[in-house]
Amino acid sequence: MSASILIIEDEEPIQILLKYNLEAEGYRVRSSAQGEDVAYLVSEERPDLILLDWMLPGISGIEVCRLVRAKPESRDIPIIMLTARSEEAEKVRGLATGADDYLVKPFSVPELLARIKTILRRLNPEAVAEKLNAGDLVVDRKSRRVNRGQRDINLSPTEFRLLEQLMQNPGRVYSRSQLLDTVWGRDAFVDERTVDVHVGRLRKSLSRGKELDPIRTVRSTGYAFDERFGKN
Ligand code: CA
């Protein structure tokens, strides 16, 4: 089961950016622009982590943080605060209110994703698996080693991230542009065909001779890790 993240953010472009990137990472995401919704959303389904904007139109991020911390059932949910630069002086107060971490806008998405992973790993080791397994294929995220049966597979850092991305959500189809954003980063100046080139190399490294190819090409859409791989 993938981790669930609740976003409370009133700036629509940021909310969309967060949702898009977190879903591409395989998280289940719910969002709201209203701090007042937090009690309802948390009772509907307890999130594994809350991303909370500081400045909200109704009750403030600090108030939301207090509400979450005041209830025994939500007290332990980690909170990452998003603050604007001008509010930096207030950070200490935010942390005193019980936020686990904070990021100043404009933040980098890879940085945010890294912080989320760190917190989830600390609080819920199962939420971010250290090893990804499918059939005879094992990806060790800690040592960054890949094995197929007894064979060590050497991948470039890009190919490793590509495999990791696809493999953490078997069956999920990623478009080339989604893979560019999550594997290469939003600012990378690379062509969508680059994705095809790297997927080609990845396939060559993963499958030799008659070994089954774990990656599925979805015509005119993109790529997926074959959810049936290793299951028959
Ligand atoms: Ca705001």
Image (cartoon, rainbow, N blue to C red):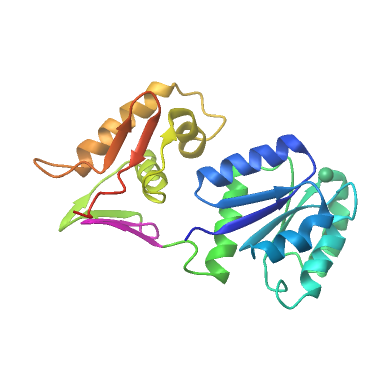
Query: Farthest residue toward the left?
Result: 209
Residue 76 colored in magenta in the image = no
Query: Where residue 210 sits in the image (x, y, percent)?
Result: 9, 42
> Which quadrant of the figure has residue 97?
bottom right
The residue that appears at 26% across and 33% down in the rendered structure is 201
**Does 92 appear above or below 222?**
below
Left or right, 177 with respect to 81, comes to left
- Kindly tell me whether residue 100 is visible in this rendering: no
Query: Where residue 2 sits in the image (x, y, percent)?
Result: 49, 58
- Of 218 and 89, which appears nearest the observer? 218
Q: Indicate the quadrant of ligand 1 in the picture.
A: top right
Left or right, 113 with respect to 11, comes to left
The residue that appears at 61% across and 50% down in the rendered structure is 29
Residue 133 colored in magenta in the image = yes
**Does 107 appear above or below 133?**
above
- Of 197 and 58, which appears nearest the observer? 58
Residue stretch rendered in magenta on the structure: 130-143
**Does 65 appear above or below 157?**
below
Left or right, 78 with respect to 120, comes to right
- Kindly tell me whether residue 32 is visible in this rendering: yes
Quarter of the image with the C terminus is bottom left
The residue that appears at 82% across and 58% down in the rendered structure is 91
The residue that appears at 52% across and 34% down in the rendered structure is 181
- Of 144 and 38, which appears nearest the observer? 38
Number of disc labels: 0
Query: Where residue 146 sits in the image (x, y, percent)?
Result: 28, 53
Query: Where residue 44 sits in the image (x, y, percent)?
Result: 68, 62
Left or right, 104 with respect to 145, comes to right
Query: Farthest residue toward the bottom?
Result: 72
